[in-house]
């Protein structure tokens, strides 16, 4: 067999490269119906193939970065290591791009703006870039909470969107701790012991009891204010009040209250807060939480911003809600998504940022970045290389507000 | 080398099996620090190993199903093929278990119950099993909508939870169609053409314009009723009204209206509905959508049910909201989740049903099933093998209500 | 606030649609730096916006399918249900496209070809389309094995690539069954009982003992033939022999032997077969398994095919090996991948088919399909709608060979 | 309605917590068929519920870590940040556990051992812990290669398993660079330009041409040695030779050659190396690559180790091959997996380490760790906190060998 099927020596040892032959055959119109096998078997094939070989790789743009990871022979420098991520490829590169994208938000934010600021939701923002931060409740249950609290404390973000759990888990942590467990602990055994599992975290029932004791009088007070002062409660106003009441510098929402950062959570009843509101409604009925005023407030934050950046950890409501608000302004200027969702099931959670461009939720000329990873691994490092690295400038700016 | 390192012939050719030796060495306490290599090298090893070999596989329970897939030599019988899934393994088995779990809900639902039914949310349900159905908006955008519409039309489910998009996409489809596209279509090009992408689906801007034209007068009317009749609007009441107004048998919410199936969507402003409400609020302000009354209504559905089943497609709010309501009754009796989420990031979306058991959202003695798959592939087949298969009995039951 | 920020009534109630305004502002060059907020606030805005509104959705191509799922009101017809998948969206549509792609392979395969067939690997195939089937070992452990056995028995595929486990698990199942278990069974407890877990499947150690008893004499015989007859063993030749020896119509490899379908598994030592070969090598050394002859044989199957189709279940070696062989012919003409891998980590396993086009492993003008799902859910249904549906024509063709 | 359905005031305002009531009702046998709704509706319910409330959360073990993330108010200290990961939860905690697990391998490795070392595969290793490193080819294409090269250069690992691409991509990078691209670049356009895509990396065809020019004479030489000196080639021997020939300190396999670290890749023909071997076989036939000798060599590395650690990046062959070798010694003592695979499809790639315990591939008393993430994000950081952090001690040890 092999004597009849022999490659011409020049093909194999000369400069023409087999890879190029195969490519060339594929791309040249004259040859596209011929197969390598026929070429090689036919006596006249080599010259044809050789001619085809003239087609080489198109040179790549000069500025394309070469892939190269961190060289530990240079010693251990974490900052340099994280900077090498952008040329490491795959999600390390996505991390590097996310650092760049957030730093663009920060630079834009620090640009001087002349206009007056009357501190109203529907007035033009005084900031060069309004940053929307969204996250799912599990991140507050995790130690990512401390990164979020840092951003809120130092007014590094302007609008927050989260779920009910994203509110209550922060408040509960001011009352009692959450613990490290394992993903594989059995639900039945935990239930019998009154321990709730969130991934590999554990929260005793007792924590929710403490939360109930803390919350019930506040709900009474809210109903009273509604009845006597005509307070029109919305989820964001309730969260503002809860942040004031918790009065604890560990709390994200304490700082959101202090720094007047609105926190939106339209489905605020979907969690322990809802359980309490439900039971409370039998004792002291009448509380109204209106979501219409909040959507107006949230959208205005986007519409009247000079430019906007979205940083969204996780999927579901928090991702859609921020992006939808930015649709009202023809799309965000900057965007970073960190989540583990995949696009194949057509969910908004897993959609690539490019899907949001089709909707006008992100600008057509933006360079949004998605990092495919659990945010617990990525977000503290992202904060390190962006907000924390620029902390002195950002905190300066806030003080001179 | 090989002459010194030889296995004893009995080890290799006799009945003792190497797999058993290796296991035995591992499990016997006396031997646990010895390694196979030492055993084999040592002259005295074989007898020791042979003794250890007496430890064999523990017999498995008799009723454990053997793995065996469909035999196409029997001809092509789709029903038999789907029935073979339970012994096919992996997610095929999960599908088979999900069929069983939903059929348990159906049998329980059909059990005769004596109690009076006053058709009030806080009265004991007259059904043996109250079925909660949840799904994310993308499933309404997809052709899964027709399966959901079927269940609603024939009153096969009792409570629905979805997102804003899960409402509006159904209504919009009554006005103009959604098309099949590709996941890889470029966002910028689509945006320039006014086409929105949802995974591999395409929705022209024009559809949203038609929706706007349809919705605005209804919003005017809602504000009017609120002002003149004191209507206290909640998301579920608004959805009921929209179902009535759309008046189209293709619509899920038309049938939910007709059959008085409550539909909960606490973050109803998070979508095109919210956009419309936002713009409308500048023209005709004052609409209030209260989420407190709805949480009371939803929780009561769970609390006063005889037994409950949860069928939840996708993650995020819809999954948590139904499960949280079932916490109010010590957990659902039956549960089927279909989604692509993973537990490793600690999200509720990706959590296994066993996590919900730790919280008391599912009963400790339940046999919940999660099918890891895009619901578009799985749900129509699940409906086929459960609700549609039992259609005559279920529809009979509804009529005799 | 609201009196100054009011939308012009025409904007809200006339035909111009807000969605179009937002899009139009975004896409019109003159307006691209203006924001909706500014537009709305400015007195002269509405006419500008109205002008912009003239930009509408570009009409979609006429032949774009509308999304519509199965209507169970028509009764339960599984075939019609599966046919509705293509207009159901997401992975249901991918399933529908995969059915079409495989049916294209089948039609091509059935096209009459004149050329002589000398049944040699390096001669032009007599078939219009050579079908390569790849799968990971877990699918043989599962009931997908019966679908694969069907395809092999009826010579519906031409070349198989699998892993070591993909070979041995089929043979072992001829000796003793595999059982259905659960993903959450504890490894330690199973180990103590001598039970091995594969996902939610269970295989007792005893099965591997039976396999050892069966295999050892065959290895002796192989060494003998190598020494006495100069047999040059390769993995594919060994698999052919094992298929002959097992002599059981339940076995995939029995039929591959009978029908002379080559099965490639270059890392054949990576599994229980390797364990046995390892131990056997101390008793009866000298066996050589050469992988060079097999790569030549595999590549020739691709190079000399008229056209090729790839059906690949799972990732890793089986996916890469088939695709790489098709690179030798400028790419496969048809391709269907079914797996759960994701592209974000840069793995070949998770790569979309479009990555393979860049390499020339799939033709530039092909329409490859990836279905993102566990193959246990999808492959039996795919076989139903393709090979089994066309069984009479395909089996006819084989007989007239 | 609400007047009849009222919670007893003590229930709502006293110390009994609703969460505890619900739990208690669930777990107490007497009450398990009662529902909260019935309890609350019944006049006698509160005392019963109150009694039930005595059941509180079981106290958690004292040593359970509390969840707490990094506090950026302490300034930016990357080391402290990474150390805070273990109490951050989710995959950050998994990262922290993986650091601990690898550091256990390192400590064990550094333990003094008295025995003679004759540097033979089947002699007892002189190291306290033999470390097996496995990785898929994409990681060599990425900048993770530099971390792997560092480990190999300083003899920090003992046995390597990778795929064909994992070998050739390292060698090719010594000839020409790989570039950063994007995941969404179109395959057809890239193919027309002779550019191959690996995730978001780009490799020009030209690189493979250079590789061909470099490799062909080596293949000639290998055939010559086989014929004249009787060299029995195996994949590991070929890789050793390629490492010698590349003679470049950037190369992983140069250092594996220098430091005599065996590299196993049983399917070495599955890649560009196979393409070259295939074409070369027509010009200069006869090369034999035997995989039997390699499986004996690999297994012996596990069997004769004092203890073993597995570090496996990615899935497929590299994961299974290392684990299977460790089955030969009753399981590895330490294990860290980093990959994005999921267990639900029953693949070995996605299996949790606990599945490997059932097989005896990991010891029953081990504490294996899986980090669910793209290795490009995780592995350089893991190396930083383990091998690089302990570099002086590890390199010391190597020199005193």
Image (cartoon, coloured by chain):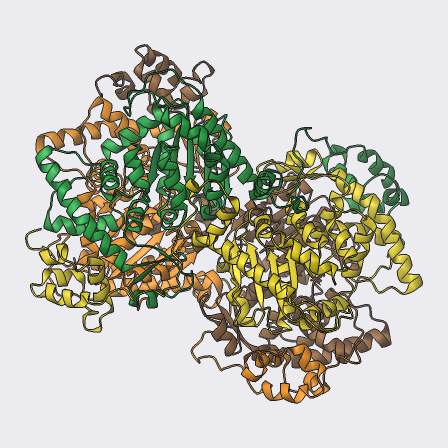
Chain colours: A yellow, B brown, C orange, D green
Q: Is residue C250 above or below residue A274?
A: above
Q: Looking at the image, which is closer to me, B155 or C383?
A: C383
Residue C335's image quarter?
Answer: bottom left
Q: How many marks?
A: 0
Q: Residue C162, percent across and down?
A: 30, 45
Q: Residue C42, percent across and down?
A: 70, 84
Q: At 81% from the left edge and 48% from the top edge, which residue is drawn?
A: A247
Q: Looking at the image, which is closer to me, C130 or A303?
A: A303
Q: Looking at the image, which is closer to me, D311 or B203?
A: D311
Q: Residue A161, percent across and down?
A: 68, 59
Residue D49's image quarter?
Answer: top right
Q: Looking at the image, which is closer to me, B398 or C64?
A: C64
* Residue A331 horizontal side relative to residue A82, left or right: right
Residue D290's image quarter?
Answer: top left
Q: Residue A268, percent across and down?
A: 74, 57
Q: At 80% from the left edge and 50% from the top edge, which residue is drawn?
A: A276
Is residue B64 something that shows in the picture? no
Q: At 60% from the left edge and 54% from the top edge, which residue is drawn?
A: B312
Is residue C398 something that shows in the picture? yes
Residue at the extreme right of the image, as rendered: A228
* Residue A131 horizontal side relative to residue B27, left or right: right
Q: Is residue B47 above or below residue C232?
A: above
Q: Quadrant of the C terminus of chain A?
A: bottom right
* Residue B264 horizontal side relative to residue D162, left or right: right
* Residue D273 horizontal side relative to residue D311, left or right: left
């Amino acid at each position: 067999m092999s004597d009849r099927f022999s490659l011409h020596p020049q093909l194999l040892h000369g400069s023409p490269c087999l890879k190029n032959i195969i490519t060339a055959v594929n791309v040249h119109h004259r040859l596209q119906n011929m197969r390598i096998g026929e070429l090689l078997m036919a006596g006249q094939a080599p010259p044809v193939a050789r001619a085809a070989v003239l087609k080489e790789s198109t040179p790549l743009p000069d500025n394309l970065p070469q892939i190269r990871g961190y060289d530990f022979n240079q010693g251990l420098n974490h900052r340099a290591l994280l900077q090498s991520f952008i040329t490491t490829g795959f999600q390390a590169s996505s991390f590097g791009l996310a650092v760049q994208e957030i730093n663009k938000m920060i630079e834009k934010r620090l640009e001087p703006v002349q206009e007056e600021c009357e501190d109203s939701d529907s007035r033009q923002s005084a900031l060069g870039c309004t940053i929307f931060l969204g996250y799912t409740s599990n991140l507050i249950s995790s130690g990512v909470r401390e990164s979020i609290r840092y951003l809120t404390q130092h007014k590094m973000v302007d609008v927050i969107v989260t779920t009910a759990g994203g509110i209550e888990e922060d408040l509960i942590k001011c009352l009692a701790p959450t613990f490290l467990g394992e993903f594989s602990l059995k639900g039945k055994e935990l239930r019998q012991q009154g321990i709730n599992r969130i991934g590999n975290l554990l929260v005793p029932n007792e924590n929710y009891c403490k939360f109930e004791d803390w919350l019930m009088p506040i709900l009474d007070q809210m109903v009273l204010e509604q009845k006597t002062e005509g307070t029109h409660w919305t989820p964001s106003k309730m969260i503002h009040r809860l942040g004031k009441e918790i009065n604890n510098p560990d709390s994200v929402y304490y700082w959101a209250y202090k720094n007047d950062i609105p926190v939106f959570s339209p489905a605020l009843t979907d969690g322990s807060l809802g359980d309490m509101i439900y039971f409370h409604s039998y004792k002291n009925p009448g509380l109204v939480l209106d979501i219409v005023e909040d959507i107006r407030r949230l959208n205005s934050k986007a519409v009247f911003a000079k430019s906007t950046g979205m940083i969204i950890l996780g999927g579901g409501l928090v991702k859609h809600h921020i992006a939808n608000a930015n649709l009202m302004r023809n799309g965000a200027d900057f965007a970073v998504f960190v989540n583990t969702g995949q696009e194949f099931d057509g969910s908004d959670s897993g959609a690539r940022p490019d899907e949001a461009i089709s909707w006008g939720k992100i600008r057509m000329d933006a360079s949004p970045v998605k990092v495919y990873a659990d945010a617990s691994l990525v977000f503290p490092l992202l904060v390190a290389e962006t907000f924390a690295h620029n902390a002195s400038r950002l905190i300066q700016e806030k003080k001179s507000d």
